[in-house]
Amino acid sequence: MDDPSLTVRAPVGLSALSLRGLVKSFGGKPAVNGISLEVPAGSFYGLVGPNGAGKTTTLSMATGLLRPDAGTAAVLGVDVWANPLAAKQILGVLPDGVRLFDRLTGEQLLNYSGLLRGLDRDTVAQRARDLLTAFDLAADARTLVVDYSAGMTKKIALAASLVHAPKVLVLDEPFESVDPISAASIRAILTDFVHSGGTVVVSSHVMDLVQRMCDHVAVVARGEILAAGTVDEVRGGASLEDRFVELVGGPGRTEGLSWLHT
Ligand SMILES: Nc1ncnc2c1ncn2[C@@H]1O[C@H](COP(=O)(O)OP(=O)(O)OP(=O)(O)O)[C@@H](O)[C@H]1O
């Protein structure tokens, strides 16, 4: 953290997200194989792993979107599956492959999301305007979400996940399809959120971004956690990217594609 005065105000020792022994199989094939993870309150936590590692499956179980075969998930001590309404009040979620009510305009979608969360009309209208401005979508507030680009859709979904002022944000690939200027402003919004006492968990494939942005990281592969801790602990003096490759295994073989050579 750049400014030492911006200390995290979360209760000491309380996990923002506590995953214990999460298991999920699809058609008998294990996707998540007993994942346990403690995300400290006030941390900016990165979840990295190769394609198909089980990141989305884990985050879906952690946020009440996919029922685990076994294991538990709790947000700030509230069990996500035993007490879903209370958990969802303190959680903001950007799911993978965002499915939105895309026949609404961006502004209507934010208003709808806020009203669903029980906010009053005036509060929600003000927050919707603030979020549209913060995500550089004010000019497209009256455009249908179905007509948004992929990056704009990601941004409006992220804005919708914030409208009820959650305490813990779980974001699956928030930077995918987002241009560099928007990515920088999203990073600033998330960093500010953490500095004010919130917790952010992001999955990402971009190691450099995770190394710069996050203070903690977990490396997932084949449905298991290979390493977890502060970014410095996990990378152990190397770059996160080199450490990732070392943990997960090197690049695949390309010899079989000789027919592609010109
Ligand atoms: N609904 C589903 N039905 C069947 N198999 C699934 C389903 N969802 C995920 N899987 C399988 O579970 C495994 C983990 O997938 P998951 O989407 O969690 O990985 P990921 O780490 O998020 O990958 P990526 O980085 O490519 O998004 C994969 O083998 C995937 O094929």
Image: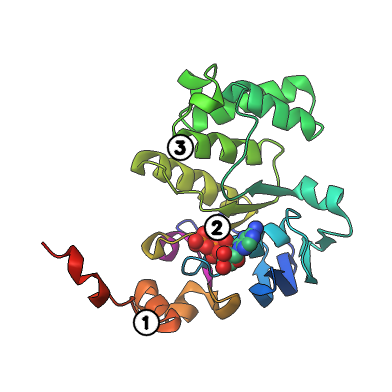
Could you tell me residue 220's position as x and y percent?
A: 54, 74
Q: Is residue 228 magenta?
A: no
Q: Where is residue 105 in the image (x, y as percent from the top left)?
A: 59, 21
| Front: mark 1 or 3 | 3
Q: Is residue 14 visible?
A: yes
Position of 32 with respect to 237 (left or right) is: right
Of label 1 and label 3, which has the lower sequence position? 3
Position of 138 relative to 213 (above/below): above
**Residue 124 placement: quadrant:** top right
Amino acid type of the residue tagged 3 in the rendering: Ala
The tag earlier along the polypeptide, 1 or 2, is 2
At x 76%, y 49%, the residue is: 90
Report if the CB atoms under discs 1 and 2 are less than 8 Å apart. Answer: no
Q: Is mark 3 on a helix, strand or loop?
A: helix
Asked whether 8 or 145 is in front, the reply is 145
Q: What residue is drawn where x is 36% and y is 41%? A: 179
Residue at left 58%, top 50%?
96
User: Residue 253: which numbered mark, if any?
Assistant: none
Residue bounds of the magenta highlight: 210-219
**Residue 26 locus on image (x, y percent):** 68, 67
Task: Specify the amino acid type for callout 2.
Answer: Val
In the image, taking residue 60 as reference, residue 189 lies left or right, namely: left
Q: What amino acid type should be assigned to the residue bearing mark 1?
A: Gly
The residue to which callout 1 is attached is 237
Q: Report helix, strand or loop for mark 1.
A: loop
The residue where tag 2 is placed is 202
Cα–Cα span, label 1 and label 3: 36 Å
Inspect the magenta stretch and tell me whether residue 214 lies in it: yes
